[in-house]
Every structure is written in structure tokens, then in C-alpha cells.
Amino acid sequence: MVTFSPGFRGRPRSSDVRLPPGQYETYDFPVLSAGPTPRVSRDTWQFTVTTEAGTAHTWSWTDLMALPSERPTVDLHCVTKWSKFGTQWQGVSLDLLLQDVETSADYALVHSYGGYTTNLPLDDLLDGQAWIAYGYDGEDVTPEHGGPARLLVPHLYLWKSAKWVRGIQLLLEDEPGFWESAGYHDYGDPWREQRYQGD
Ligand SMILES: Nc1nc2c(c(=O)[nH]1)N[C@H]1C(S)=C(S)[C@@H](COP(=O)(O)O)O[C@H]1N2
Ligand SMILES: [Mo]
């Protein structure tokens, strides 16, 4: 007898249902970076959440490692049209990192080492939808893919998953990040094919 685990390919049409409009499936893991790969040491790495009131909450690498982690398996969708199914990560849920942060903010601007930024509604970082990921496929996340740690927010196009994440700025007003200022969609839902402003 042959059995398939849920979501595994082999179920009829499963890959059609998993593929957002305009995307194709890829099996390798392309690297897309707008600039050089910053080399960030775990000794000096920090992750800082800043509220609209200016309060900063900072975690060192040791602090991050001391927190309980999750192992999400997720599909990735890049706006350049590749999708990669069933990627396996390890990281700390943003629900945990934000649970003691007092804020009235509705928006988040994510900052990376190297200067990259991207914006999203704060709600999209909560309810089990986003992680600070430091493991990929059973190994450390490589520098090219955002190590030591990257944001992982797989329900939006992958440009929202900031590599080399350094902090999250909580804001009362939406503020566009790097690609959003260059004409990409403010929200970026792959299922609604929100690639560019006006989509
Ligand atoms: N800091 C930073 N994060 C980034 C980027 C970047 O250039 N710098 N590129 C984004 C884009 S456009 C994509 S598609 C994904 C690519 O992630 P990957 O290189 O691990 O495939 O990272 C996103 N995060
Ligand atoms: Mo991208």
C-alpha cells in the first residue's frame, strides 16, 4: 500500500492548489539580494523592537536562543514568479517576541543589517504567521539566505521576509520600505497577485 502524508505531492492536483496565480514551482533555492551580503556575527547581533513611543526591546543572540522555537514548514512565493514548496525552518514566533510589547501601532517597518527595509501591517506578524528564523533544512540559515537570522512571513511575497533582520519599528502610520518605495505593492499577497502598486 502506498500512503502520502497530507500536503505531499502525489495527491491529485495538490501542486495546482498550492501555486498562486502567475507562479511556477522551483526545486532549488534561488538567492535574491538587492546588495552585498552583510556578515553579521552572532556575538554582536541584536534584534530590537521599537514602539511608536520610542521604547526599545532588545534581544541578543543568547536571548533569542533561550526562547522556545517552532519548526514551521511553509511554501515560499517570490514576486519574480518562483515558488518553493515545503521549506523547513526553525525560529522564534513573533507572537512570543511581541507579547510583552505595549503598542497601539497598526504598522511595522522591518529593518535589516545592510539597510534593507520592508513594511507590513502589524497583524500580519501575529497569530502564528511570522518568525525570526535562524534554521533552514536542519542547518543554520546561510548568510546568503539571511543568516544569522531573517524574518519569515510566508503568506506574503518573499520580499517581505527581510534577511539579516535587525529590528522592527512599530508605527501608527504605514511607511513604505525598499521595494514598496520602488513601485512594488504595499501589501504583497501572492494569492491576489499583488506584485506592483495598483495590482
Ligand atoms: N535584507 C534583505 N532582505 C531581503 C532581500 C534583500 O535584498 N535584502 N531580498 C528580498 C527578496 S526580493 C526576496 S525574493 C527574498 C529572497 O530570499 P532568498 O535569497 O533566501 O531566496 O529575500 C527578501 N529579503
Ligand atoms: Mo523577490
Image (cartoon, helix red, strand yellow):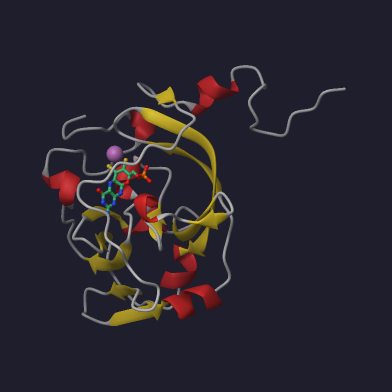
- Residue at image position (35%, 42%) is 158
- Residue at image position (88%, 22%) is 1
Residue positioned most to the right:
1
Q: Is residue 71 left or right of residue 182?
A: right
Compared with 64, 94 (above or below) is above
The residue closer to the viewer here, 146 or 154, is 146
Q: Splitting the image into 4 quarters, where does residue 54 fall? A: bottom left
Residue positioned most to the left:
182
The residue closer to the viewer here, 122 or 141, is 141
Residue positioned most to the top:
12
Task: Name the image quarter holding the C terminus.
Answer: top left
- Residue at image position (44%, 55%) is 130
Q: Position of residue 120 (x, y in %)?
A: 28, 52
Q: Position of residue 162 (x, y in %)?
A: 31, 54
Compared with 167, 131 (above or below) is above
Compared with 148, 181 (above or below) is above
How many numbered callouts?
0
Q: Position of residue 49 (x, y in %)?
A: 31, 73
Q: Position of residue 67 (x, y in %)?
A: 54, 74
Q: Splitting the image into 4 quarters, where does residue 59 fall? A: bottom left
The residue closer to the viewer here, 188 or 142, is 142
